[in-house]
Amino acid sequence: MVVTGDVVNLRQFRKQKARTEKDKQAEQNRLTFGRTKAEKNLTSALNEKASRELDQGKLDKGEGDA
């Protein structure tokens, strides 16, 4: 009794595997880095506001105050 498996073209198999891995990486990158321009602008505005508020709360040390 001879058992034969399906014949697989290794070149095509490797290419398909590479495409699948590339698609997985692309999906991960979309989740990690994919933000709309509005979201980026909102984050930037919030960071600038926080920086301004932090600077406003600083106390200036005058000459001779020790």
Image (cartoon, rainbow, N blue to C red):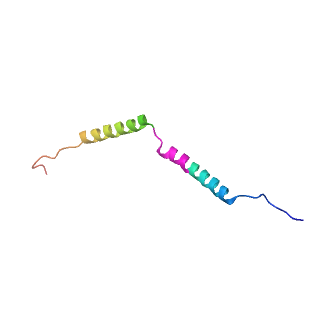
Q: Extreme top residue here?
A: 38
The secondary structure making up most of the magenta span is helix
In this picture, residue 60 sits left or right of residue 50: left
Q: Extreme right residue here?
A: 1
Camera-side residue of 37 and 58: 37
Question: Is 28 part of what is drawn in magenta?
Answer: yes
Camera-side residue of 24 and 5: 5
Q: Position of residue 35 (x, y in %)?
A: 46, 40
Q: Position of residue 33 (x, y in %)?
A: 47, 45
**Dividing the picture into quarters, in which one does residue 43 lie?**
top left
* Total numbered circles: 0
**Which quadrant holds the N terminus?**
bottom right
Q: Position of residue 58 (x, y in %)?
A: 23, 43
Residue visible at 12% across and 49% down? 65
Question: Is 16 part of what is drawn in magenta?
Answer: no
Residue visible at 51% across and 44% down? 30
Q: Which residues are magenta?
A: 25-35
Residue visible at 73% across and 58% down? 8
In this picture, residue 44 sits left or right of residue 28: left
Camera-side residue of 43 and 53: 43
Q: Position of residue 14 (x, y in %)?
A: 64, 58
Residue visible at 79% across and 60% down? 5
* Location of residue 22 with respect to 58 vertically, above or below: below
In this picture, residue 17 sits left or right of residue 55: right
